[in-house]
Amino acid sequence: MILFNLKCAKDHQFEGWFRDGDAFDAQAAAKKINCPICGSRRITKALMAPRIGKHGAKEAKQTEIQAAVLRELKELRKKVESNCDYVGDKFAEEARRIHYGEVDPRGIYGEASDEEASALTEEGVEFAQIPWLPRQDS
Ligand SMILES: [Zn+2]
């Protein structure tokens, strides 16, 4: 069992025990959890590491955190892929053209070598490096 810190749409915080993270997701999606203070059914996990009710807490917590990070990376990747143009290995070139106003600003993503990335940083071109996951449709 995992104890999650939860909060409702109005920011009331409370706690709830769940079999695992998936059990919470399923119950929240089915609107089976409601806020004890205002009754709201829009419940999300508050940003706190979950506590584990049994031994092996440390390992379980690490697994949970890793899973959460992976989920967020997947979400981020989805967001980037649906909002940005893929420019492949032309990333550095395109980022520069946008930075210097040669083309209209737009979101792009692609690959850049370490040297390209540090050259961009030196030129003051803004970009973010994301640890990209190998594509796997689980
Ligand atoms: Zn509430």
Image (cartoon, rainbow, N blue to C red):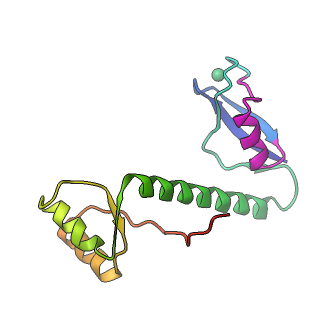
Q: Quadrant of residue 128?
A: bottom left
**Viewer-proximal residue, 128 or 52?**
128
Q: Which residue sits at x=70%, y=62%?
A: 62
Image position, residue 117 (x, y; %): 30, 75
User: Per the image, is 17 magenta?
Assistant: no
Image position, residue 92 (x, y; %): 26, 73
Left or right: 2, with 74 as reference point = right
* Above/below status of 65 relative to 41: below
Q: Quadrant of residue 5?
A: top right
Left or right: 130, with 89 as reference point = right
Quarter in which the C terminus is drawn: bottom right
Image position, residue 130 (x, y; %): 44, 65
**Viewer-proximal residue, 51 or 82?**
82
Q: Quadrant of residue 124?
A: bottom left
- Which range is magenta? 18-35
* Above/below status of 106 relative to 35: below
Q: Quadrant of ligand 1?
A: top right
Image position, residue 94 (x, y; %): 23, 68
Q: Which residue sits at x=80%, y=58%?
A: 57
